[in-house]
Amino acid sequence: MTPYVRIKEYVINLQNVTFIRVKDDCIDFGLVERQDGQNYIRFEKGVDLQEAEFEQVREFVLELPDPDRVILV
């Protein structure tokens, strides 16, 4: 599997992701380095992603081979 995933305008290096927080209305990708003053990228359902896109990203995250980094809230 490639370490890079593209979601909308973001290309995320999965090797630099320290955590992925999955909530009912958003998904956060926690990063090793700060980007624009924050250390995570948030995708909100209905804002950044349509509902179908959000569910697709959610399914992808839940199928990642390193489940220790995924936090379900």
Image (cartoon, helix red, strand yellow):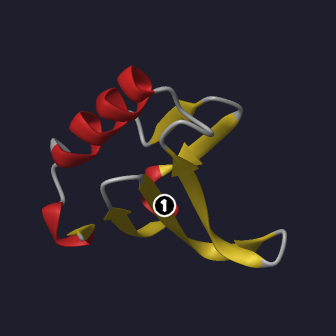
| Left or right, residue 49 beside residue 25 | right
- Residue 70 found in image quarter: bottom left
- Residue 37 found in image quarter: bottom right
Quarter of the figure with the N terminus: top left
Whether residue 1 is visible to the viewer of this picture, yes or no, is no
Of the pair 55 and 3, the residue shown nearer to us: 55
Residue occupying the far top of the picture: 52
Considering only vertical position in the picture, is 62 above or below 17?
Answer: above
Considering only vertical position in the picture, is 13 above or below 19?
Answer: above
| Left or right, residue 57 beside residue 59 | right
- Residue at 57 percent of width and 57 percent of height: 42
Crowding near the residue tagged with mark 1, few <14, some 14–19, many ≥20 C-alpha atoms within 10 Å = many
Whether residue 47 is visible to the viewer of this picture, yes or no, is yes
Considering only vertical position in the picture, is 6 above or below 67?
Answer: above
- For label 1, the SS is strand
Considering only vertical position in the picture, is 8 above or below 69?
Answer: above
Instruction: Give the labeled residue for mark 1.
Output: 29
- Residue 38 found in image quarter: bottom right
Say which amino acid is labelled 1.
Phe
Residue 10 in the image: state x and y as whole percent: 67, 39
- Residue at 63 percent of width and 29 percent of height: 8
Quarter of the figure with the C terminus: bottom left
Of the pair 70 and 4, the residue shown nearer to us: 70
Of the pair 40 and 47, the residue shown nearer to us: 47
Residue 35 in the image: state x and y as whole percent: 77, 68
- Residue at 22 percent of width and 35 percent of height: 59
